[in-house]
Amino acid sequence: MALLLLLAWLWTRPLGSERGDLTSDGRMTLTIFALAVCAWAFTSVDDTYIALGAGTSLVLLGVMQTEDFFATLGDDVVWLLVAACVMAVAITASGLAQRVAGWLVCGASTPRQLVHLVTATLVVTAFAIPSTSGRAALALPIFVALARALAEHRSLVKVLALVFPTVILLSAVGSLIGAGAHLVTSMLVQTATGTGFSFTRWLLLGLPLALVSAHLAAELVLRLFSARADRKVRLRLSITDLEDRPGQLTGSLTVGESRAALLLAVTVTLWCTEDLHGIHPAIVALGGALVATSPRYGVVKLKKALPEVPWSLLLFMAATLALGNALLNSGAAYYIAENAFKSGWFDSPVPFMVMVVVISTAAHLLVQSRSARSAVLIPIVIALAPGAGVSIAAAAFASTAAAGFCHTLPSSAKPVALFSEVKGLPTYTPADLRRLSFWLAPMSAALVLIFSFFVWPLLGLPVS
């Protein structure tokens, strides 16, 4: 009913040609976008199918040029993600990730040490594994091994079950490739201002927030779901407890692990020094993927790695990027900005940023996909920011960072769903998630606001 009322209102609005007026293209775009958001939120239809259908509709209606729609499929951010995924397959196949995780967590002698070592390990994976779903899939076997080794400490198993997806989601902001939504945000900001976020700039801004939020969240989970006596237990974890087969994690690095470690180190270094050598991150990633799959040096064959690339995610990201561009180019985002927020309450930086962060934090309750949330929110944020005297880049980055919170329901994010049901192991219930979210949501939003006004300006991203 609400959708029908919204569409009826849109189609009764007068058309104009000035900035902020509703144009015919803007009306069509908002109609298609409203239908897409409702389909994402209230149907079980695949998110990628909905996004592609919406993009195709805009082309058929003449709102978007065919070339503009298909151009997003060949965008450099899509190539960056494809190449990074190929490298991630090679790193996973080499066994390096499990070995490093084993070395770290087996140094813990108390539950608190274990939780924070797990947290530190998961933060690092944001630079090696694109997408939160991929990191969750990589981390699941490590959790299962830890849970079996700690079977007598049921509360600690629940703590770890919550820590893994919580940290994976909150730490993603530390890397440009940590989530597809980051790439969507960067490209939309580039469309609006001519300059997006480089890998280095995103790292400089996002990693401090990732570290602080992840470790605070891990500590919160530990305190909420374990008793004081549980936190004082002495742990005796051996690296052999985490092995799927004897000798898997002990001994010196294998040739494959050594090559994967060197490749990862060189790739991340080149990403972080783009300003010095000028090589685009997508080209660096593509070169790394070619090395990782090369006949002599490679850890895995290209034929085996390519099927593991999340093509559905890539198509979804490209389609949502096209939809976001359509919102900006058709004037629909500016129309929403002029009419939905014309009360004047949000015409200054502080209330505007609070509004952006609060809405972005709560948006997962309506739209589960992180990339879809960015495609919906970022164009509107871009349209509103100048009127509030706020930097477009600062507002977009804060919105994307706040959207990292999506823990309220098992369906809110794929990592949360993945760890909620692990065969043969007790994890957590929807009630546990609601209890965690009651505390974590305001903490996460507050951290983003603190960083927006006090930390990021010192790092070159002022609010205004």
Image (tube, rainbow, N blue to C red):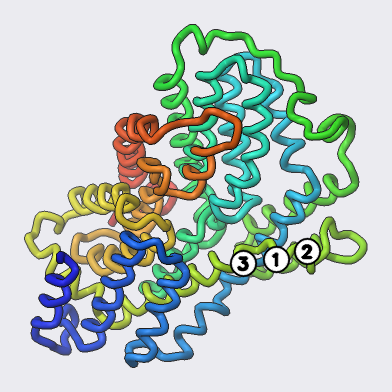
Q: How crowded is mark 2: few (under 14 residues within 10 Å), some or many (20 or more)?
A: few
Q: Mark 3 or 1, which is nearer the eye?
A: 1
Mark before the other along the chain sequence, 3 or 1: 3
Please, is residue 421 above or below residue 91 in the view? above
Q: Name the residue under label 1.
A: 307
Calculate the distance from the C-alpha at mark 2 to the C-alpha at mark 3.
19 Å
- Residue 399 can be seen, yes or no: yes
Amino acid of disc 1: Pro
Tag on residue 435?
none
Seen from the viewer's position, the closer of residues 232 and 186 is 232
Q: Name the residue under label 2.
A: 304
Q: Mark 3 points at which residue?
A: 80
Residue at image position (37%, 66%) is 375
Query: Residue 217, position in %: x, y?
Result: 44, 31
Determine which quarter of the picture holds residue 187.
Answer: bottom left
Amino acid of disc 3: Leu
Relative side of 30 to 206, left or right? left
